[in-house]
Amino acid sequence: MIGIDWGTSSLRAYRFAADGGIADRRDTAGGILTVPPGGFPDALRAVAGGWIADGETQVLMCGMVGSRQGWVEAPYLPCPAGLDGLAAAAIRVPFDGADVRLLPGLSCRDRHGVPEVMRGEETQLLGAIAAGEAEATACLPGSHSKWARLAGGRVTGFTTHFTGEAFAALSGHTILARMMDPAAPDHAGAFARGVARAKQGGGLLHHLFGLRAASLFGEIAEAEAASFLSGLLIGHEVAAALEDGVAPPIVLIGSDALTARYAAALDAFGVPHRAAGPDAAARGLSLIAERLP
Amino acid sequence: MIGIDWGTSSLRAYRFAADGGIADRRDTAGGILTVPPGGFPDALRAVAGGWIADGETQVLMCGMVGSRQGWVEAPYLPCPAGLDGLAAAAIRVPFDGADVRLLPGLSCRDRHGVPEVMRGEETQLLGAIAAGEAEATACLPGSHSKWARLAGGRVTGFTTHFTGEAFAALSGHTILARMMDPAAPDHAGAFARGVARAKQGGGLLHHLFGLRAASLFGEIAEAEAASFLSGLLIGHEVAAALEDGVAPPIVLIGSDALTARYAAALDAFGVPHRAAGPDAAARGLSLIAERLP
């Protein structure tokens, strides 16, 4: 069986052994934005054709490949949702030589009725649940960071923050861009100062101008400003999530570089956290595949 | 006497009559960003040379023309500051044919010690004070919105929010750009929904993603999204300013289009407000000029 986490800007493919372990893997930058119209079958052949020729007959995919901009749109499955629900909602796509299916993403509503969506993270969450996080809050940092509630083996709801996209837009397309060196390495002290600033009153929009003014007064260096901004935004995200009532401990799922930042921010708020095991998405894909109808 | 409010992207010049009234005025798009290096004297001649040839001998300028990127840098004057302090801090710049002076901007620190700066707004604030707003909170909407405390005839302190710049970056350089029509006219209902959303918990970063998700679910139209985003950001600004302890009534100073949005947001928060009289900057320049040493 082949599992693929096919996102906007990257693709991760796994070939599974009979015992569910990972026999082989490929990471590419071939996200859905790189696929021309009608090009998804060819893109799948390019990454997994060899495994299919070698005898694999089942391909299960998750992520933005199931969005309106992907191969075929797989409508969102409402929370709460678990392995069986996702397996039942997978949709087949036409393909020669293998049984290819797309997983839907998940949707829910926040307490005020505003919609929430995810695509791909649900598979990581179910993998983390299977690895022992049956009752927890999971945080998946990213362009659109997710805070998900896991209970009874299912994802019961989640909240998204626009943190990564806000960082890119504010650091690249405002006057702040002139006062920061985007090539500077991470600066832990400046990140911590940004988190500490987020814990003060005044609001994010006020804190953003304070970064500009601090630069005018020589109170923050170009090499520190991007890390400070990252800490400020992540700090505001964590503060809002905590006010929203997330229950620790927090399970962090994602790249080491990004989860390390969230771990530092959670430390600053005094909130216990731990890292999920590796390859949560692969584990989720494998477990869902076992349940396909 | 000639007064000039010379900002980043625009220039407003006033010729005053002997009684302090406005005898003539010129508005141009010739902000400091349009002036080549060493070009400020020529730019001044272009806008006010005729008035100088006609006998005016005094020119007083405020705004970004006194910044590091302007004609000559006039260091910030710390708050509290009034007419006499600003007049005393004006600096002369070399110019043939008239006594030309630049006003400094103002600086202060917020309650956590983070610096604040303004350039140009101080002149509007002192004009508003002279027009009767001796004890008030003034709000000047813009790219960098200012909330200033006026007491005893002086500006005693102020707080800045990055609202206008954040709107431009988020609406133009994130995935939100794909779901909004920037040419759509203002939509009062969508603006009001954005303000109402800001009053809910969850944080600005969460609310930004909610706008994206609402679009995916067809719950907000392209023609409404920009107005919703404007209401969301202004609502967060107003909420933060109120938490910061600003004392109503709020005096709104600025263009009719922008102050109307803030008036609607303040109404939604139940906070009394009123509009400052017109030409606050001209009044401030005229009064400061009378006090020049």
Image: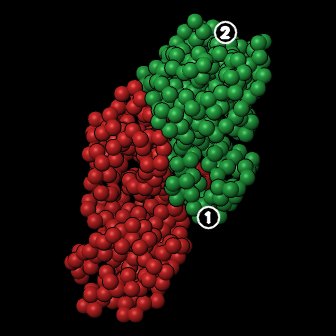
Chain colours: A red, B green
At mark 1, the secondary structure is loop
Q: Residue at x 74, y 19 (%)?
A: B16
Residue A225 x %, y %: 36, 38
The span from disc 1 to disc 2 (Cα, nearest Å) is 60 Å
At mark 2, the secondary structure is helix
Q: Earlier in the sequence, mark 1 or mark 2?
A: 1
Residue B51 x %, y %: 70, 24
Residue B276 x %, y %: 74, 24
Relative horizontal placement of residue B90, taking residue A185 as reference (left or right): right
Relative horizontal placement of residue B103, taking residue B125 as reference (left or right): left
What subunit carries mark 2? B
Q: Which residue is mark 1?
A: B217
Q: Residue at x 56, y 20 (%)?
A: B96
Q: Which residue is mark 2?
A: B290
Which amino acid type is shown beneath numbered disc 2?
Glu
* Placement of B163 over or under A166, stated as above or below: above
The one nearer the camera, A78 or A240, is A240
* Placement of A223 over or under B136, stated as above or below: below
Q: Residue at x 76, y 26 (%)?
A: B24
Visible residue check, residue B252: no
Kindly report which numbered mark, 1 or 2, lies closer to the viewer in this rendering. Answer: 2
Residue B159 x %, y %: 54, 26
Q: Residue at x 61, y 38 (%)?
A: B30
Visible residue check, residue B292: yes
